[in-house]
Image (cartoon, rainbow, N blue to C red):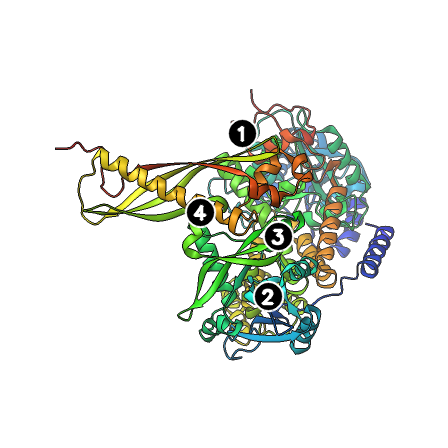
Amino acid sequence: MQMITKYEERVKGLISNNPDINKRIIKGCSGEVCVLFIKQLTDREKLSNHIIQPIMHYITRKNNLMINPTIAMNSIILAENCLIEEEEGRLLENLLEGMTLILFSDTNTYIVVEIKLVASKSIAGPELTFTLKGARDTFIENLDTNLSLIRYRIKDPNLKICYHKVGRRTKTRVAIVYIDDLVNDAVVTEVEKRMNQIDIDGISASGDLEVMLSNDKLNFFPQSGIIERSDVACGALLEGKVLIIVEGSGIVLVVPKVFCEFLWSSEDNYDNPYFGLFSKVLRLLSIFFSISLSALFIIITSFSYDLLPAEYIITLSVSRANVPFNSLTGVLLLEGIVELLREALLRIPKQIGPAVGIVGAIIIGQAAISSGIFSPLLLMLVSLSFLASFVAPDFTIMNPLRLMKFFLILLSGTLGIFGFSFGLCFLMTMLISTNSFGIPYMAPFAPYNKRDVKKIFLYNKATTKQRPHFLRTNNQRRAK
Amino acid sequence: MGNKNFRSLTMVLFVGLILVGCWDSGNIEQQNNVSLVIVDFNEEQYSFYIELANVLGGNLRDDQGGGGYSILHASGPSLIDARDQLNRRSDYPVFLGATRAVVFTQRMADKGIEEYINRIRREYDYRKSVVLLTSPTEPFLLISDETENDRSVGDAIEHTLENQKNEGQTVVVTVGDVLQIIALENVGFLLPQISSEEEENTLTGYTVFKDAKRIGTIPAEERKGIAYFLCSNPAFYYETKDENNHFIFNVVMVKKNIKPLYKDNQITFEIDMSFECELLYMNKITTITKEQQKHLSEELTKMIEDDVISAIKDSQRTYRTDYLGFYKYFRAKFLKEFKEMNWEEKYTQAEIKVKVKAKIEGGQGVDFNEKEE
């Protein structure tokens, strides 16, 4: 009774600060049992059927028998996940994590039962990475569900899941998943090291963690990829990658991820390798176009006219005849408008999205040409560049490249072809200097590995029997 | 990327801005794009007639702008003075990168084109692939007809030449070619000639140049033999007649082998040419016997041989300069001797043996293998 009172006093203090903590006291002849839970995080049906009802049944039927944590856990409570805890200091922590606590009047120990119920959406189709042939089940905000989706596909005993808690206040569970005999041990060590170095009050999604795991916080380029679909995540595990799954986030991080992998789609693996090659080359070209078309337009119309064949010089001059701005101003204005439209389309509700698209594409575009503010060629190039920026399956790589596009435009507008070349060299230097958890970012091009280049361009599980060498996996062989 | 890197980047950019001096930004539409240059020399005055695209002169209500082509004329006692006057008359900088053709008048060709060719070499925006021509027609007359139709004369001339070149009918000579030949000395060259005939600009033959000065003109009727030496895929129509019929052949050169020999200070060239002659049609459709076929073949061989020999004879005897490119074959095999000799003199004394083989093929339903009834 003393104990209960002691706990009750403590809990009372807690309840005054956290009114969502509930208590239920069950009195018996041999003592009292106090059940503490947060009703928003608890499966109340299970609480009733698996905890309260059996305890009451035990107490009323066997009046003279003692009830203690060991007896309760072994013979009374029906919940499958429970343990006996002795540490008083973890009382509140367990409660805030959504656990149900069973306290006893005559002992310091208590039982922690997991009958959490977290509201989450059901497994739905992908929203970021559409697929024709791939699976459509995506990760959701529930960590256990996400892990179950992986376990469902990979029945390997070597599939290893390590849990971490990140955030002094949020105590967010983070699972690091990999296949033990496949993964590059150095990558796992690096991930663990960086996870342990995180000291922050809280994270709310995998995006927070992505920034914190980067070794160069000001680097433009993402060092980890994002995965929405479980089949893609399992494919990454089988390639020897490490997944980082954050509780409460439907986006899973994958490391290491090199530059060219941001441009590869899982769909490529399901297609004929030649079509995959075609798609990959197309995406690489698109990336180049998206960052360079506007800058090249400035170079050609303001600095190096003679780069064009003679017959096009006059045509291009005529198309710009009545344009009031110089090329740099025109490009910056139009690119600015396009960025504005992009931001607007991302934020506005889906129902009015197409309307904004029409306003942007038709009304502004048509009006700009009719009024002679922009030349038709410039509008075409900027639109092409805009379209090309969407071809990367992992869109996170496009954000730094969008910034680089403006960097190249400004350099080309002031220094001409020298500025453009300088900008490209700077971009390449940055890319080559970056690494993703110890793996060179531009692998397998820098450092160059001919066999890996062939493997990644003509990738097909049936024909490419070895994993890329640059990942330095423990087991290189994929098939015999 | 820390502060140190940022500082380094800023330094590189700053130094780049100062050292490179790429502040020559302009606007492509704010320049006078030249499509044709005619160079004349008359009464001790050099003249430029340049055809400009009217980029900014068009109707502003028109989306595309533009208003056809106009002519700018400037002259002066020297090429520099003429250019200076041209610059003073031009509202925007003259841009020569869009030039399609340069035409020298006959008077200018007589005076000599070497100075202007060397000017082109120094002009950074002139393309070395610009085609060169000559014209006996007065410049304004050459330009006027097409300009009235808002068509570029330069564009039309270049396309005419390209078309004729692809048909295997004419030689196209660029600034780069002439620069190369002038550097060699003692080698002549040809430029296509264009004239206004019945108010249409027409290719009317070749102008022969020696020491970069005009020494004569070869009419279009005599161009076949020249084409067999200078065109990559020459093809011409030949017409033969007998008592009862009239045959038109398309003659295509399929093989050319020129073998230079040098013995006892005597240059000899052995030329071996093979032609395929496709019978296009005849006046009356009849069966051609083997005898007739043989006769036609001999006749065609003779006609082609005459054209080839005539071209060589003109080159060796009439103009006494190697504009047919024999020097290339000789130099390739006897470089040391070539450097030591006066090619022009030796070439005129060279013995040239011509062997022509014309093979007749049926076409359009003509069967040469048909048996006589």
**3 or 2: tag closer to the N-terminus:** 2
In the figure, residue A109 lies in which quadrant?
Answer: top right
User: Residue flagged by tag 4: what amino acid is it?
Assistant: Ser
CB under 8 Å between discs 1 and 4: no
Q: Which chain is disc 1 placed on?
A: A
Circle 2 packing at 10 Å, graded few (<14), some (14-19), many (20+), is many
How much space separates mark 1 and mark 4, taking CA atoms? 70 Å
Q: Which mark is residue B310?
A: 4
Q: Is residue A276 visible?
A: yes
How much space separates mark 3 and mark 2, taking CA atoms? 19 Å
SS for dot 4: helix
Q: Which chain is disc 3 placed on?
A: B
Circle 1 packing at 10 Å, graded few (<14), some (14-19), many (20+), is some
- The residue that appears at 69% across and 39% down in the rendered structure is B340
Q: Which chain is disc 2 placed on?
A: B
CB under 8 Å between discs 1 and 2: no
Quadrant for the C terminus of chain A in the image:
top right
Q: Which mark is residue B108?
A: 2
Labels 4 and 2 in the same subunit: yes
Nearer to the camera, A159 or B136: B136
Disc number lying in front (4 or 2): 4
Residue A105 relative to residue B225: left or right = right
How much space separates mark 4 and mark 2, taking CA atoms? 28 Å
In the figure, residue A326 lies in which quadrant?
Answer: bottom right
Residue A110 relative to residue A182: left or right = right
Disc number lying in front (1 or 4): 4
Q: Which mark is residue B176?
A: 3
